[in-house]
């Protein structure tokens, strides 16, 4: 029994694919719940106002932030268009780190930094075997 379990986990990167599945879902839902739902007013009295450091039209800025914090994490959690779906999130988190929080102490800018690192990792590594991307591309 032990031999079969461990051979499954090590064979063809089984454990790493399971870890990628868990990581993808955990990071995506953390972003969605902690930051995305506030943008549309769920769980708060009024919807959060998104900073606009690039001077975009307010509607475009708000819409981009909503897509990046709500829609894209759902795609990533499912493993659908994962590498492309990470790009809007990286745009938001890297802008937060390098522009919005540039002069802030590290304790303030650690959140956009950690999200950037996590989603950059998924951009490089991909969604893994347990994803819709893998299913559709290897059909």
Image: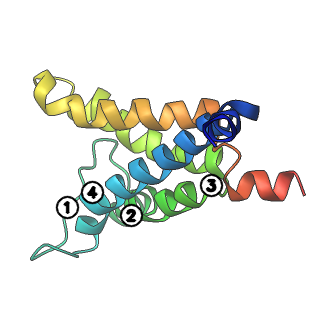
Instruction: State the CA–CA distance, disc 3 to disc 4.
Output: 20 Å
Callout 1 secondary element = loop
Secondary structure under tag 3 reads: loop
Q: Quadrant of residue 83?
A: top right
Question: With 54 as the anchor, is 9 left or right in this view?
Answer: right
The CA distance from mark 2 to mark 1 is 11 Å
Mark 4 highlights which residue?
A: 35
- The percent position of residue 86, horizontal first and vertical second, equals 54, 45
User: Residue at (21%, 75%) from the top-left corner?
Assistant: 41
- Measured Cα–Cα span from mark 4 to mark 2: 9 Å
Question: Residue 107 at x, y = what percent?
Answer: 11, 28
Q: Residue at x 34, y 62 (%)?
A: 62
Q: Which residue is mark 3?
A: 79
For this rendering, which residue is in front, 92 or 52? 92
Which callout, 4 or 2, points at the residue further toward the start of the chain? Answer: 4
Sooner in the amino-acid sequence: mark 1 or mark 4: 4
Q: Mark 2 or 3, which is nearer the eye?
A: 3
Q: CA distance from mark 2 to mark 3?
A: 19 Å
Q: Is residue 12 left or right of residue 138?
A: left
Asked where in the image residue 70 lies, by quadrant, the reply is bottom left
First in sequence: mark 3 vs mark 4: 4
Task: Please name the colour scheme applied to the rendered image.
Answer: rainbow
């Amino acid at each position: 029994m032990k031999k079969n379990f461990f051979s499954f986990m090590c064979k063809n990167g089984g454990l790493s694919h399971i870890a990628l599945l868990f990581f993808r879902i955990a990071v995506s839902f953390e972003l969605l719940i902690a930051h995305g739902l506030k943008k549309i007013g769920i769980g708060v009295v009024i919807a959060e106002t998104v900073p606009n450091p690039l001077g975009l039209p307010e509607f475009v800025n708000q819409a981009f932030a909503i897509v990046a914090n709500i829609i894209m994490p759902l795609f990533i959690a499912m493993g659908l268009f994962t590498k492309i779906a990470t790009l809007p999130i990286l745009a938001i988190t890297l802008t937060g780190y390098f522009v919005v929080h540039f002069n802030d102490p590290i304790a303030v800018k650690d959140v956009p930094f950690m999200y950037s690192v996590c989603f950059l990792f998924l951009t490089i590594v991909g969604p893994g075997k347990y994803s819709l991307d893998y299913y559709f591309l290897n059909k």
